[in-house]
Every structure is written in C-alpha cells, then in structure tokens.
Amino acid sequence: MNSSERHSLPGAGGFPPPRPGYLPDLLRPYSSSGLTGGSSRLSGGEGLRGAAHGTTILAFHYKEGVLVAGDRRATASNRIMSNRVDKILEIDGSALLAISGSPAMALEMGRILDHSLKFYRRSQLSEISLEGKLRILAQLLKDNLSMAVEGIGAVAPLFVARDGDAVRIYFYDILGAHFEGVEFSVGGSGSPEVQGILRYLDRWGEKRLGSLSREEALLLSLRLLETASYFDSATGGVEGQDPVYPVVRLLTGSSLETVADQEIALLYRSEVMRVR
Amino acid sequence: MFDEPYRWIDAIHQRRDYISSQLERAAPVLAVSVLEGIVLATFHRQTPKLFELYDRMALAGIGHPADLESVRGQLLSLAHVEGFQRSPSDVTIERLALFGLAPKLKGAFEDISVPPVILNVLLAEVGQSPDQDLLLQVSFDGNILRSTRQSVLAPDEETRVKIAKLLEGRLPSDLSPLSSVLPGIGRALLEALHSPEELGQDESGHAVIPEKAEECGRRLLSERVWEGILVDRHNTARIRRIPANPDWFR
C-alpha cells in the first residue's frame, strides 16, 4: 500500500470516511438515490413520462429583506399531478429553498440540505458559513448530474439565505453552478414573463424593487404568478371553485415569515382578481 | 484475575466508587417545563454541558467532557440519520435513550476491561403541550429515570433528591411562563452550589446575612459560566439561549 492509498481508506460499504459535520456522508450507506453520491441505473428517456415538472418560482429584494414565492402546480407532461405543492422550503429555520424541476429530486435535496445545516450547527456548535451552505447545495446538484442528463431528475433551485444582517438570493443551474441574483431571480417554465416584468419594473418602475414595502412586494408577487399562469400551463393559477393560493415566504435579517393564506386570499381577490 | 464471580462484583463496586468520586464535584443541571417549552440551566467551569440534540430535543451531561462529547456525537448521528430516513417526528428521546444510549452505557460500565464512561446524561423533549414534555436521565450504569415537570441531573441520587426538593420549593406550584420560573432556578442553583453558612443562613434556612448570598451570586457569575437554554415549544428547529440575569442569584 502506498501513502496515497493509506490516506484514502474507504469507510463502511466502500465509501470514503465521513467528513466531520457533513451529513450527506453519514447518509451515503443508507441512500439509494443519486443525491448522496450513488448513481442512476435508469437509461434512455423512458422514465421521462412519469416525472413531474413545471413551476414558477421567484425571489426579489424588498425593503425589509427578500420575498420568495411559488405557484402550487406539479405536472407530468400534459397531466396536472397536483395543485397543492409547496415549493418554497424552509431550511434550518434561517434560509429558503425555492425548487423547480423534478419534485422528487428537489424535495429530497431540500431534506438533505435542511438536515445537513442542522447537523452541522448542532455537531460543530456553530453556524456553517454562507459559502458552505452554497457548496452543499452545489454538491447535491452535482451528485444528481446523471439523473439530470437522463432527463428525469433535473433541478434548478433558488437559494435565499442570510449573510450577516443582509439577505442574498442565489440561483443554480442543474450542474450546481450558482450566481447571486442581486435584485431578483426566477426559475421554472413560467419564469420568462416574470423575469421580463421584474427587470422592467426594477429599471423603469416608479420604485426600485428593493424599496417596495411588504404589502407592495406581496401584491407584486401574486400578480407575477398570475401572469405566469396565464402564459404557462405548467404554472398553477388560483381556481375559482377550489382556491389554493401561492406560497409566499419572507426572509429578513432577523425573521422568517410564511404569509398567512387569509392575507393572500384577501389581497388576491381584491387586487389580483379585482373582485369588488 | 476476574475468573471468580465475587472478584467481578468487587471490581464493579470499585468502578462505581471511582466514577462517583469523579462526578462528585459536578454542578447540577436543572430542567423545568414552562409554558414556552423546557428550560435547562447550569453552570460550567471549562466546557459546556447543555446542547441542542435534534428538533424538539436537548442534551445535558455532567462528567468527563471527552465522554460527553463522544456520547453527544453518537446521539447526534443516530437522531439525524433516523430523522432523515424516516421523519423528524419518529425521533424521540425515549428511543434514543432506550435503544441508543442506555445499553451502551451499561455495557461500558460492566466491561471492566475497558476504561469507564464517566457521565450522567439528561435528555429533554418538548411536546406540543406541556403535559407531553418528557425528561429522561440515563446514569453511567445505564439506569433510566423518567420525569415530566422537572428534573435534576446530579452526581448521585442523594444530591439529586436534595436539590430536587430545593428546586420544588423555589418554583411556582403551577405551570408558569419562563420569566417567572428563571428566578427560582437561579436561586436553587445558588443554594445547590453553596452551603447555608456561605449564603448567610441560619440552621432553619432563614437569611441572617443577606449580603452573603448576594456576594455568592456575584462570585458564581464571575467564576463560572452560566448556561441557560429553552427548548422552544413553537420554534422547534433550534434552541434559544437565555442570558443570565444577576437578580436571579441573590
């Protein structure tokens, strides 16, 4: 055995020894998904037909922090699988992950990320850095590469987290590359319209996005999602008979709030649907 | 050497005496159910004793810091892997104590060929309502003590009973908010860590020289490190640290 072999002895099950405070390493022996380092056994495009996709998610800065919102629809091809999906996940009570792409993979990534950040904080007795959080998510996306290129598990999330007192928005591609969305970021099949509107408003609107009040930001997010659902069949709107409202969460330097359905319903009826 | 039963029993007795003598000077940990959750409080000199364990759960330990760290690491891994594989609601301190911790501590205690684990542990789990709160103590020999309203983690049974009685006398009789329980916890810790003479009390426990108790409180806060946490009933994802208030220690 040479010295390099001695330093790379595998742990149980042939995996490398777990890194301190890194939960995905601990989970590897129990995981059968690609997310924690395994590989997909599926090949070809057969799996595509059953995979659920379709979304509009958005995040933008407002006066007090960042608003993150998403529609509720999950689709598989031309079928609506659900109109009640929560795509804005709370991570460790201090960050938000907005998911677009394959819900199976995205929700699993959310669970791993949430558990990883908590495990790190509790085991190392300190918060992991923002860069560390971004790297864990990037690693999960990279580990999911085989599923993404097979066309059944691509995920492109938005991640919103605190950086000291500030709150920052990051968007990822399916390979794990991440960039900061300085004013806003969007994702999902309904995002082109939303992106255009946000760019226009931030550049030429009466107010920059970052100076909107909580109420103004909330109303804007609902109107943006309604616009996306108008153009994109994979983005859910609010049905008259069975209203399920978008999920809107607000992250500030000191708080994380889920906007209550009742508040959204009132605003939606009066200012989006214009029901008088 | 241990080929005869009485020699093994003798060795176990020696081991118990040794561990007890090592634990003797440890400051107790007090745990009390309050309206907002479960509060845990203690003082330490060198290394912390109170830790967040999982959603809704905290861990306290008195004994050797290295043993505490080793047990903490194992429980953290157990809880997080279990919570990830199944659901966070499937992780309970009852399962962690009964299937994870107690057999290991008992095994380590009775295996006289290995160094002993010098550690008494308290696990706290907050419920949705106060009547669902649970406090479990696991002692170095693997024994389990279950409590609901309040619990005292102490070096031995005699000290535990003594401080528990002291604490009971200092707390409101009904379930109360955190703010009205903390002064009682502070006072109970002060009395647990000082003799009546040091606190200026007479034989019946009445304060004869109150300035002495104030001085003890000041010294306690300057010489040791206060630890107070709340396992929050409504925000279960993370524990809340409680800063010390000198008014509680007089």
Image (cartoon, helix red, strand yellow):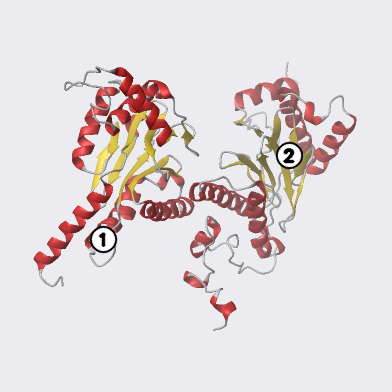
Q: Where residue B246 sits in the image (x, y, percent)?
A: 42, 24
For the C terminus of chain A, the image quarter is: top right
Pick the residue in front: B122 or A69.
B122
Does A227 sit left or right of B119 as displayed? right
Residue drawn where x is 72% and y is 41% of the image: A169
Q: Which mark is residue B107?
A: 1
Residue density around tag 2, few if under 14, some if 14–19, many if 20 or more, within 10 Å: many
> Can you name the residue that lies furthest to the bottom here?
A1
Indicate the amino acid at tag 2. Answer: Leu
Query: What chain does badge 2 belong to?
Result: A
Q: CA distance from mark 1 to mark 2?
A: 54 Å
Query: What chain does badge 1 belong to?
Result: B
Q: Where residue A104 sits in the image (x, y, percent)?
A: 60, 53
Report which quarter residue B220 is drawn in.
Answer: top left
Q: Height in image: B102 above or below A267? A: below
Does A274 sit left or right of A13 as displayed? right
The answer to whether marks 1 and 2 mark residues whose Cβ atoms lie closer than 8 Å is no
User: Does residue A234 appear in the picture of this structure?
Assistant: no
Pick the residue in front: A172 or B76.
B76
Mark 1: which secondary structure?
A: helix
Q: Which mark is residue A58?
A: 2
Q: Which mark is residue B125?
A: none
